[in-house]
Amino acid sequence: MTDTPFRLTSLAHGGGCGCKLAPSVLQELLAGGPMAGPFERLLVGTETGDDAAVWDLDGDTCIIATTDFFMPVVDDPDHFGRIAATNAISDIYAMGGTPIMALAILGMPLGKVDTAIVRAILQGGAAVCAEAGIPVAGGHSIDSPEPIYGLAVIGTAKKADIRRNSGAREGDALILTKALGVGVYSAAFKKEALSSDGYDEMIASTTLLNRIGAVLAKDADVHAITDVTGFGLLGHGLEVARGSGVGIEVAFSALPFLSHARALIRQGFVTGASLRNWASYGEAVTLPAATEDWQRHLLTDPQTSGGLLVSCAPEAADRLVEDIRAAGYPAACRIGAVVAGAGTMKVRDLGNG
C-alpha cells in the first residue's frame, strides 16, 4: 500500500463508477443524436447501451473498442490505477473478446498531486494490463481540476463469439459472477468507516479481471453477457431486458453481496449514484411490497469494476456456475431468469434480508 500525504479521494467530488452520468441523463444526451449507420461492418454501436463497440473486420474477426475512466475510489494510487484498469478492460471481456492493447487516459491537477503519486497510478494500471497480457501502448494526459485515470482498450474476437447485452432469450437462467456492494464499501471508505478486511475484500473484487467472459462467449449455451457497473444490478439488468425484448426477474435472496454490505447499508452508507439510479429507472422496476430502503439501495448500488451478468440456457446454468467458480470467481451464482415482458425488471423473494 502506497502512502500519500493526503487522501486522494478528497480531490474528487465522486469516485469510481459512481461518477457515471445517471441513466436518464445519458439517454437524454443521446436522444436525437446521429445514428451510427450506414456502416454495415459496425455490429455493435450505441443502440442498446452495450459495453463496447464492435467492428466486423473481415467477416470472421472483429475489433472491439471501449474506453472507461473515473476519479479515485480509494486513496492508494497503485490501487486506484489497478481498479481503473481492471474496470476498463472488463468491457472487452463482456463482449466475449480478448484485449490486445490499451491507451492510458490521464487527467491530474498539477501542483496538487506529486509526480510520484501519478507514477504509482500509471504503474498500477500497467501492472493490471500486464496481467491481462497487453501493453499500455500510449495515451494522453491533461491538467484537470480533479484526478482522472482510465484506459481506452482494443480487443478482438471471432464474430461467432461476440456476446451482446441484447441476446437474452425467454427461459434463460441468469448468472452473476461477482458479489455486489462496492458502492456501499466506497461510501464507507470515504467516511473512514470501512474495516481493513472490508478494504481488502473490495480491492480483491475490483482488481479481479473478468477474463472469464472470453471463455463463456465460446459456449453456445451462453446467449448474452454484460458487466454490472455504475448503473447497478437493476440498471444493467434493464439494459439487457430492453435490448433483448424480454423481462428480467431476480431473487434478492439469491444475490451475492460483499460480507459487510448489508450492515454498512443499514448504517446509511449510500452513494449519490444509487439515488440517481433509482430516480432514473425505478418506474420500470417491480419490487416486492415489503422491500425496505436498504434493500433497494443494494439493488441500485453502483459497482466499480463489477462482475458479469450472464444469460444462458437453463440446463447449462449449474455447469457454468461450477466452471466460473473454478476459474477464480467464488461468488458466482444463479440469481434469476429471463421471462416474458419486454423491457421490464422484477425483484422477488426478499428472503431474510
Image (spheres, rainbow, N blue to C red):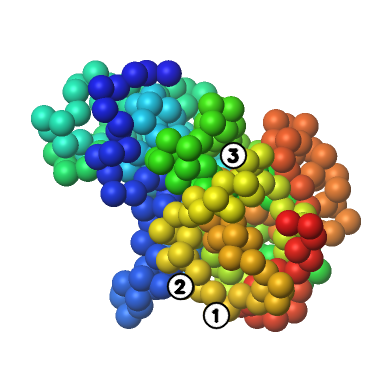
Asked whether, in this view, residue 151 is left or right of residue 133, the answer is: left
Q: Quadrant of the N terminus?
A: top left
Does residue 351 sit above or below 257 in this rendering? Answer: below
> Is residue 188 positioned above or below 167 on the image?
above
User: Tag 3: Cα neighbours inside 10 Å, few (<14), some, or many (≥20)?
Assistant: many
Query: What residue would you read off at disc 3?
Result: 210
**26 to the left or right of 353:** left
Q: CA distance from mark 1 to mark 3?
A: 31 Å
Which residue lies under the disc numbered 2?
280
Front in this rendered view, residue 54 or 103: 103
Q: Amino acid at mark 2?
A: Ser
Element type at mark 3: loop
Which kind of residue does numbered mark 3 sit on? Asn
Instruction: Return the x and y of residue 130 as percentages of the image width and height.
Output: 47, 23
Which residue in the rendered view is the most extreme toward the front?
267
Residue at point 51%, 53% (across, down): 268
- Looking at the picture, does residue 48 appear above or below residue 61? below
Crowd around label 1: few <14 · some 14–19 · many ≥20 (10 Å): few
Q: Secondary structure at mark 2?
A: helix
Q: Are marks 2 and 3 in contact (CB under 8 Å)?
A: no
Q: State the image coordinates of residue 140 (x, y, percent, origin top left).
A: 22, 37
Q: Which of marks 3 and 1 precedes in the sequence?
A: 3
Where, by quadrant of the figure, is residue 142 drawn?
Answer: top left
Give the amino acid type for the residue marked by disc 1 in the picture: Glu
Give residue 351's position: percent from left, percent from top. Answer: 80, 60
Relative placement, left or right, of 198 versus 249 is left
What label sits on residue 44 in the rendered view?
A: none
Q: Residue at x 43, y 35 (%)?
A: 192
Residue at 36 percent across and 71 percent down: it is 25
